[in-house]
Amino acid sequence: MVTKFILLGFCLGPRICLFLFGLFFLFYVLTLLGNGVILGLISLDCRLHTSMYFFLSHLAIADMAYACSTVPQMLVNLLSPAKPISFAGCITQTFLFLSFAHTECVLQVVMSYDRYVAICHPLRYSVIVSWRVGISLVGTSWACGSLLALVHVGLVLRRPYCGPHEINHFFCEILSVLKLACTDTKLNQLVIFAASVFVFVGPLCLLLGSYVCILAAILRIQSAEGCRKAFSTCSSHLCMVGLFFGSVIIMSMAPKSCHPEEKQKILSLFYSLFNPMLNPLIYSLKSKEVKGALRRALFKESHF
């Protein structure tokens, strides 16, 4: 029975691996720094103590968490590709990545609902999206992500693994792990497909539906200033949604490759590194409240 795995990572030359190590390490630091700044500003500035930024803070936590669950292992493997990972460590990594990725999908829907209420029902916003409702929505997001990941991991653990022990990926991605199972994995693949529909297709449909309603509400606004404010309210979240779901759509609609594993690695890089790095940048550029909070924080620091 297999007790440890070898992550093959990127099958490239040592110089390219060294270059990728430096590049991905920079992206990783920017991811932690950017999301950390967002979290710090939201917690310290009372003007950002609203439902929208409460949801954004949990999105930043999810971004940092699943970047930390995969990127350090990838960086180590770029320097020493033959380093093994234990079976328990591999399963733990699979659970953490799935949990945080599923949570982010549900949080995107929660944030679109928040924007829908803010624009379509502005006078009732504080009643509909109260703090109690916001905490319940966030708790549901984390619970759904964790429970779905637990189901996947439970089914993975039921399969015997008797070799080979090489995973053609830079982390323990669930489909790559299942390829090493000694028995039939059709049930696992069926559950993965159903979960993908639940956490990807379902949220995407809800997101599109909410933004259709938002667009209709914006078009009914008479003043140009009101339209501009409504668009600016949603633009940051729309950019994040386009980045998150667009990467999946592009990769899934791309022509079939003779190396599907390499395609899966690129998609996983978007999930675990590029999207978490760009999300705080999008919000800092698009949101006047965040830029104002950053200026106030820097202004205070300069006077100490």
Image (cartoon, rainbow, N blue to C red):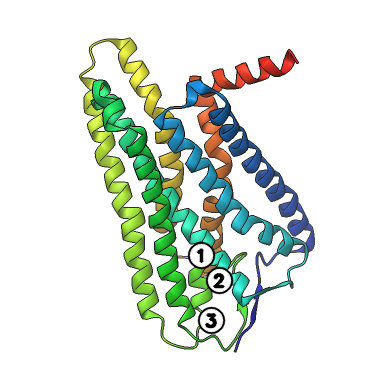
Estimate the spatial distance between the alpha carbons at disc 3 and disc 2, rounded to whole Å: 13 Å
- Residue 180: image tag: 3
Evaluate if marks 2 and 1 touch, with contact meaning CB atoms under 8 Å apart: yes
Callout 3: SS? loop
Q: Which residue is mark 2?
A: 91
Q: Position of residue 279 (x, y in %)?
A: 52, 38
Residue in front for this viewpoint, 110 or 202: 110
**Helix, strand or loop at mark 1:** helix
The location of residue 296, given as percent across then percent down, is 61, 16
Instruction: Residue at 62% x, 70% y: name it.
Output: 89
Q: Nearer the viewer, mark 3 or mark 1?
A: 1
Classify residue 9 by image quadrant. bottom right
Q: Is residue 260 above or below residue 22?
A: below
Q: Residue at x 31, y 59 (%)?
A: 197
Count of numbered marks: 3
Task: Return the disc, 3 or 2, that comes first in the chain's sequence.
Answer: 2
Identify which residue, 33 or 78, lies in the foreground: 33
Q: Is residue 283 left or right of residue 152?
A: right
Residue, x 48% and y 71% (percent of image)? Answer: 175
In the rendering, at what x and y percent does residue 216 appear?
A: 21, 27
Disc number for residue 95: 1
Q: Amino acid at mark 1?
A: Phe
Q: Are marks 3 and 1 in contact (CB under 8 Å)?
A: no
For disc 3, the neighbor class at 10 Å (few under 14, some 14 to 19, many from 20) is: many
User: Is residue 275 visible to us here?
Assistant: no
Q: Is residue 207 above or below residue 200?
A: above
